[in-house]
Amino acid sequence: MDWRQLWEIASAPDNVPIVGMIPLLAFYIYLAWKQAKANDELIGELEASPAMAKTHHRKSWPFRPGWSKEVHVWPFLLRIEFLAAMIVTIILMVWSITLSAPLEEPANPNLTMNPAKAPWYFLGLQEMLVYFDPWIAGVVMPTLIIIGLMVIPYIDTNPLGSGYYTWKQRKFAIGTFLFGFIVLWISMIIIGTFIRGPGWQWFWPGQTWDHNRLIYEVNRDLPDLFGIASNWAKAVFGAIVVGGYYLVGGFVAHGLFRRYNPKDYKRMSLLQYSIMMFFLLTMVGLPAKMLLRLAWHIKYVWITPWFNV
Amino acid sequence: MAEDNQNGKNGNRLGLLERVKAGVKEDVQSLKTDLPAKAKDQVEHLKDPTKTQVYTSIFRHKHDDTPRNRALGVLSNVFLHLHPAKINRDAVRYSYTWGMGGITFYLFIVLTFTGVLLMFYYHPTKVQAFRDVLYLEHDVPFGKLLRNMHRWAAHLMVIAVWLHMFRVFLTGSYKKPREFNWNIGVLLLVFTLLLSFTGYLLPDDQLGFWAVTVGTNMARATPLLGHEGPFGHMLGMTPYNDVRFGLLGGSIVDANALLRSYIWHCIGIPIVASVLMIVHFWRVRKDGGISGPAPVMLESEVKEPK
C-alpha cells in the first residue's frame, strides 16, 4: 500500500474539489432520502384511508394552527441568504488561505504531461475515451447528455412527485437519474481522478504509479471474432449488431417498462416514448460497451471506412 | 418740484446711509437671534435623519416594523425585488431547497469580483501570461489569495450547480409549468463548465495547456466538422479550417488560443450566462415561485386524460 501515492492524488489541489464533493453528495443524498421516506410514509397512510386523505395535512412538516401560511421574505428568507453568503465566503477564505491553486511549469508543447488529465469535472468524458473513439466520447456523448437532460421534462409524463421528495411515486425517473448521475458520471470522475495513472492505465488506489508499465493487452474487434474479413461485411455486421442492440434492448426495455410503469406507458405519446427509449438505451450502451471491453477485450463493434463504434 | 427733488435727493442720500446702517444692524441682530434658533432646529432635525430630504429621496418608505414596510423593503429595492414580498413558510426550509441555486449565483458574483481584480494584473499573451501569474503569486498584495479564491470559487460553483440540478430533479421541480426553466438551467450548467474550462488555460502553465490540448483534440473528431471526425474529410475539413481551428484560432494551442480563451472567459460566456440567469430567475417567479415543498399528491387524485 503506497499511502504517499494515495495522498499525492487526494491532496493535489485540483483534486480537492472532487474529494470534498463525495461526502457532500453523500450528505445530500441522505437528506433527500430522509425526506422522501417521510413523504412516502405519509402517502402510504393517506392512500390507505381515503377518509383521512380528505382532512389530513399533506406535508411531512405538519402545519400548526395559529401559524401564518406565508412569511415575509424580509427577514425570513433574506437572513438565510445572507447567512449562506457569509458561510460560503468564510469557507472560500479559509480554503484559499490554506490551499494554493496549482501552478505547474510554463506551458511546453514539447514536454507531454503523463497522465495529461482534463479538469476533474470532465474526467468522466476522458474516461469514456478508453471505451469509445473521440467522436463519440468527446462530441456525440456530451451533446446527447445535454439534449437528454433537456428533454427530461417533456418525456416525464408522471404528474406525481412535483415539489416534494418521493421515491415510491417516481421510482423509474429517480432510479434512472441516479444511475446516470451517480453510477455513470460521478463514479467515472472518481475513476478518472483516483485510479487512472500514467498512460491512462488502471492503478488501484494506493498502488504506486509505474511510468514504465506496459500492458500486453490485445483488443479485438467484434467482427474478427466471427471471422468476418471484408470491409463491407464488417460494416453490415456492425450495423446489424448496433441496430440489433437498439431493437432487442428496446424490446426488453419495452416489456419491463410496460409491466412496471403501466400508467406512464399509457400517458406517453409515441414520440415521447421513442425519445425516452433512445436515450435510455444509449445511456445503458455505455456500460454495455465497457463490459464488452473488460470481459472480452472488444475494441470495436462496428467498423466502417468512415467511423468505428 | 426742484425742492422736492433736492429734498428727495438729500433725503435719499441720508436715507441710504441710514438704511444701510439700519440694515446691517438688523442683519447682525438676526444673526444673533436666527442663527442659534436655526442651529437648534438643525440639531433637532439631525436627531431624526430619516426625515431629511436626502434620506427620503433614497429610501422610498418608512422602516418601522409594519407588514407593509417589510414588503416594501423587498419590493422597492432593485437588488431584492426578484423576491416576492411573502413566501410559503415551508419554502425557506433548507432541507428542501439546499440553497444551491442561490449559492451558485453568489459564487458567480464572487467570481466576477475577483475576476475583474485579476484582469488588472493579467495580459493574455504568451510572453506575459505566465509571468503575470507569478507576479500575482509573489508580489501583488493579496494576489495569491485573489487567485486562489477565484480558482476555488470556480470549482465550488461547478459542485453547487450539480447539486442544484440534483435537488431540482429529486423534487420533480422540472415538471409542469417549469419545463422551460429546467432547459435554461441545463444551458447554464453547460456554460458554468465552459467558463471553468476556458479559465483553465489562462495561467498558461503545463496543467492548463495539456488539459486544453486534450480537450480540444476531441474537437478534431467532431462528426462532419472536424478533420479527423466521421465524414469530415468529405466536407473538405483540414486542420486549418475545421471546428477545432475555430476554437483555437489556429491549429495548435498557442497565442491565439490564449486570447480566444481569455475573451470567451471574461466577456463572451459571462454575458451569455448573465442573460440566461436573468431569464432563469425571472421564470422562477413567473412559473409560480419555488416549487415546494408542495402538498403530496395521491395516485387516486391524478386526472387521467381521456
Image (spheres, coloured by chain):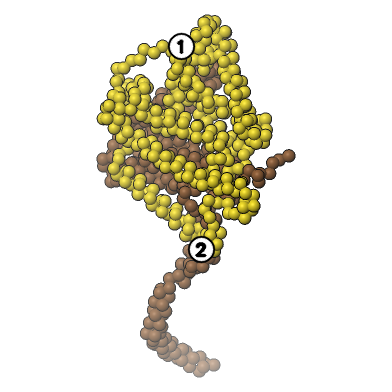
Residue, disc 1: A220
Marking on residue B70? 2
Q: Amino acid at mark 2?
A: Arg
Question: Toward the viewer: B264 or B182?
Answer: B182
Residue at the image position 53 percent from the left and 33 percent from the top: A176
Chain coloured brown in this rendering = B
- Image quarter of residue B156: top left
Question: Colour in which chain A is shown?
Answer: yellow
* Residue A66 visible in rendering: yes
Q: Which mark is residue A129?
A: none
Question: Residue A179's spot in the image, x, y percent?
Answer: 50, 32
Examine the rendered structure and indicate whether residue A148 appears above or below residue A74. above
In the image, what residue occupies the spot 40% across and 46% down?
B110
- Which kind of residue does numbered mark 1 sit on? Arg
Choose between B47 and B249: the one closer to the eye: B47
Look at the numbered disc 2 and give the secondary structure of its residue: helix
